Image (cartoon, rainbow, N blue to C red):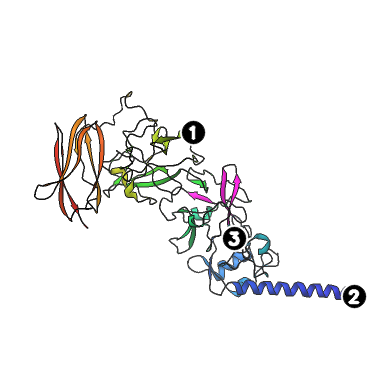
Amino acid sequence: MKKIIQILIILLFAFLFNVNARDFRVGQVPNGNKFSCNTCHTNGGGTPRNSFGQLIESQYLDGSGNVIWNEEIAMIDSDGDGFTNGEELQDPHGTWETNTQAPGSSNLVTNPGNNGSTPTQNVILATSEYGEILTDLGGYTLYYFVNDAFDASVCFDQCETNWPVYYKENILPGDGLNQDDFASITRLDGSKQTTYKGWPLYYFFNDTSPGDVNGENINGVWFVAKPDYSVMLVNNQLVGHDGIEYNSNYEQGQETVKYFVDGYGRTLYTFINDEFNKNKFTKEDFSNNPVWPIYETENIVAPSSIDASLFNIIDVFGKKQLTYNGWPLYYFGQDSMMRGKNKGISFPAPGVWPVAIPSLDIATDIENENVQSIPQSYMLSQNYPNPFNPTTTISFNLVEKANVKLNVYNVLGQLISTLINSELSSGLHQVNFDANEMQSGTYFYKIETDNFSEVKKMLLLK
């Protein structure tokens, strides 16, 4: 009799715990909330629908494929573990959570009655054959997509099935990760996705165990998310500062070009007049650095598809600049450090500052090689930006060494400022003009050499 009573007590306790746990699950998510149901399998995808998935497909999907949460769904237990948890939902990794009050780890998911459990981390760093990488709390690898050149995802349909999006409403970064590097975007279907340093984050459906990195370098466009990339790759259309689309030959046309960006997805450029591991543009006082800022870094971490030995670090008047195949790497100031922008490819003329591409030939020493990078004609470019306030950049080409005068005049022809009055070498030159002390209006700038003279108009708007 005593044994029977004990068994009844145990069964009653189990029943009450299960009911309380289910009540917690029902109460935790208000009826009517929506969740993605791209898989709805017990193993997260790749097999026929289980009973949960079949029920969802027949009764509880809205027109966009989202689960409409309700009390009946909360009571379903398709995998026989006693609870409706991550295995039934779009969370095969067992880290499903809602808001900040959530189970937060695989062992707590199967004990959801602890409604006080709140995870302290949900994105962490893990060690892999590719160095430190980002994973979720369960240790499942997160990835970047090279085609995501802007602050948006372009992975949909079958792509999204193979590469499920990663999203947490509240990111709790682990050690070595910065909260400010995380954000979220709204996808075209209205769902959310977490980003890291501007890169949307994904899982790979063939990563079936924690620590798997099976998605690395698939088709040359998927790479593990890392905290320390000094360079990454993007596939993107080139659009110059003139608003014109260019192809990889820097002629007008449409073409997706693969090129280098920094770890935040910001475009990196080379300069055709540079020599092997020699920056021939930046002045010692860095007065022209705002126009083409050097890419400063002391680390070399590249995607696995790129030979890291092709990168080097050079000294530029006390600062460290990264080079690739001997070409120094730069930003363009007018890109405003924004992802996806590559305005510099047309400034001051198309191809003078090309984007840095993986297939770049090794840079040469112009003094010792017959390199066709010296301009073949004189040219005075339109200042940029124009109109401007209060600074702008004036560029010009010289086909030979010359004594150069570059002056600024008002509409009455009065000399306002002499920007250059000296001998300059052949090649491309740029000078900044600061009109901070001048009034709004139309001004003219004129270049004069022994063999060349030209005038252009610019507009100062304050």
Q: Look at the image and tell me whether residue 307 can be seen.
A: no
Q: Is residue 286 left or right of residue 57?
A: left
> Which of the two labelled residues, at mark 2 and mark 1, occupies the earlier sequence position?
2
Q: Position of residue 232 (x, y in %)?
A: 46, 44
Q: Secondary structure at mark 1?
A: helix
Q: Which residues are magenta?
A: 123-146
Q: What is the three-letter code of the residue carrying label 1?
A: Ser
Checking the image for residue 91, the label placed there is 3
Quadrant containing the C terminus is bottom left
Distance of mark 3 from mark 1, alpha carbons? 39 Å
Q: What is the three-letter code of the residue carrying label 2?
A: Lys
Residue nearest the viewer, comparing 381 with 93: 381
How many labels were placed on the picture? Answer: 3
Q: Look at the image and tell me whether residue 64 can be seen.
A: yes
Checking the image for residue 355, the label placed there is none
Give the residue number, with chain letter if any, for mark 2. Answer: 2
Q: Secondary structure at mark 2?
A: helix
Give the residue number, with chain letter if any, for mark 1. Answer: 309
Q: Would you say residue 132 sits in the magenta stretch?
A: yes
Extreme top residue here? 368
Q: Would you say residue 458 sits in the magenta stretch?
A: no
Q: Position of residue 180 (x, y in %)?
A: 48, 57
Residue occupying the point 10% across, 47% down: 414
